[in-house]
Image: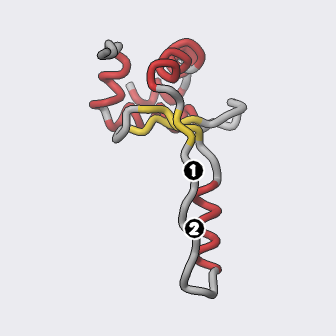
Amino acid sequence: MSSVRCPQEDCLASDDVLVHFFNDFLSLPSFPECVQYNQATGVFEVVSDAAEALSRRIRSALQPVVDNHYTVLCLDREQGVEWILKERLPLFIESDCYFEYR
């Protein structure tokens, strides 16, 4: 079953600058949970501090073997896009981030 892409998805897939501004908007502290669009995979990911925590562990590790695995939580592609279009995109369109992008 092939999914139908909406125009906003096509813009996110092809416009690096839009992705940058939209991800900046999505990471604002006014939202209870930070999500980011991963242009390489085409899905929205829930952002955590796992990567930064891993980086700190590696830098501070005295032993050469460090567990360098962490989990990236991805939203279901269709449900994620639907949620973003409903809950975040309208706010983004009204934001200073979008104004700067335009």
Is 45 placed above or below 62 here?
Answer: above
Q: Residues within 10 Å of mark 1 (few under 14, many from 20)?
A: few
Question: Circle 1 — which element?
Answer: loop
Residue drawn at (47%, 20%) of the image: 81
Q: Quadrant of the N terminus?
A: top left
Which marked residue is nearer to the observer: mark 1 or mark 2? 1
Q: Residues within 10 Å of mark 2 (few under 14, many from 20)?
A: few
The residue to which callout 1 is attached is 71
Residue type at mark 1 is Thr
Q: Is residue 34 left or right of residue 76?
A: right
Is 4 placed above or below 38 here?
Answer: above
The residue to which callout 2 is attached is 55
Question: Circle 2 — which element?
Answer: helix
Percent x, y of residue 69 = 55, 61
Q: Is residue 14 left or right of residue 72?
A: left
Given residues 21 and 62, the one toward you in this image is 62
What colouring does the structure picture have? secondary structure
- Distance CA(mark 1)–CA(mark 2): 14 Å
Question: Which label was assigned to residue 63?
Answer: none
Given residues 74 and 40, the one toward you in this image is 74
Q: In the rendered structure, which disc, 1 or 2, sits on the residue that comes first in sequence?
A: 2
